[in-house]
Amino acid sequence: MRFSQVDVFSAEPLLGNPVAVVHDAAGLSDEQMAAFARWTNLSETTFLLPPTDPAADYRLRIWTPGGELPFAGHPTLGSAHAWLEAGGVPAGDDVVQECGAGLVTIRRGDRLSFAAPPLTRSGPVDEADLEAIAAALRVGRDDLVDAAWIDNGPGWVGVLLADAATVLALEPDWAAFGDLKIGVVGPYADGPLAVELRAFCPGYGMPEDPVTGSLNAGVGQWLAGTRLPRSYVAGQGTVLQRAGRVHVSLVGTPGTGEVWVGGDTRTTVAGSVDL
């Protein structure tokens, strides 16, 4: 089977988030997919399949070392890149991906970008969860400037802290997370980046994800056009010695408009895999 490993959200080599992509994976069982995802030990491994929806160009299954996801952002961009590079031709101007979250549109341009899918859970976070989040992050309850559920499949709860420096200084208590998947955001006062993000998800088999499209999509739906500009660049992965750059833009009304999430993609490994 053809195999690609694509670095996503960085124009520089080896500074983004890699996704392993297996092409023509229709013959693989769930057990084989799960085993390969554990073996790659990347935050996500994907499998390209023929679509079942006539509106889609291909179907994608997305696995972490800990199980399958209905949607994830950097695997969406990296898999679209691999599919196009392998000769895939979309039916229309955009690429349409079928996945567990439904149909996702991927726009081609200076860089690939996806339309953020609808949130499966949104709204305020109750006090008990806020106390648990503060404990997991090892911060005071009053340090949480704002919080909201911004779940588009992986389970994200978004937390706004005072600034980027506070985000970068976090040393979470992994044993306190339970089922929580926490995305933390802190603004920069000036410079090319609007915010710094960190994505904590120990339940998926990796304590911190380097650069996270799904989280950035949820943050854009939550904060773009209000606490953040309508279009901005987010940084992620700094603590992990990465330099992720995520381009987020809002079209329409804050809170209800369409959010697009884009980033650079490049193949770093290409070959075949025997499963």
Image (cartoon, grey):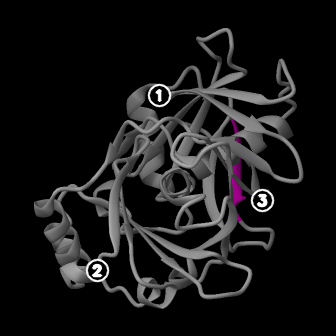
Residue 82 drawn in magenta: no
- For residue 136, which quarter of the picture? bottom left
Q: Quadrant of the C terminus?
A: top right
Res. 172 mark: 2
Q: Which residues are magenta?
A: 1-9
Identify the residue at horizontal 48%, vertical 91% (top origin): 165
Please say whether residue 9 is visible from this viewpoint: yes
* Residue position for label 1: 100
The answer to which of marks 1 and 3 sits earlier in the sequence is 1
Q: Earlier in the sequence, mark 1 or mark 2?
A: 1
Label 3 is placed on what type of residue? Asp
234 lies above or below 39:
below
Q: Residues within 10 Å of mark 2 (few under 14, many from 20)?
A: some
What residue do we see at 77% from left, 44% from top?
81
* Residue at disc 2, secondary structure: loop
Return the x and y of residue 177 as percentages of the image width and height.
Answer: 20, 66
How much space separates mark 3 and mark 2, taking CA atoms? 29 Å
Work out whether mark 3 precedes mark 2 in sequence or the reverse, and give the earlier one: 2
Three-letter code, disc 1: Gly
Taking the image as shown, residue 183 lies to the left or right of residue 104, namely left
Front residue of 86/201: it is: 201
Dot 1: what SS? loop
Q: CA distance from mark 1 to mark 2?
A: 30 Å
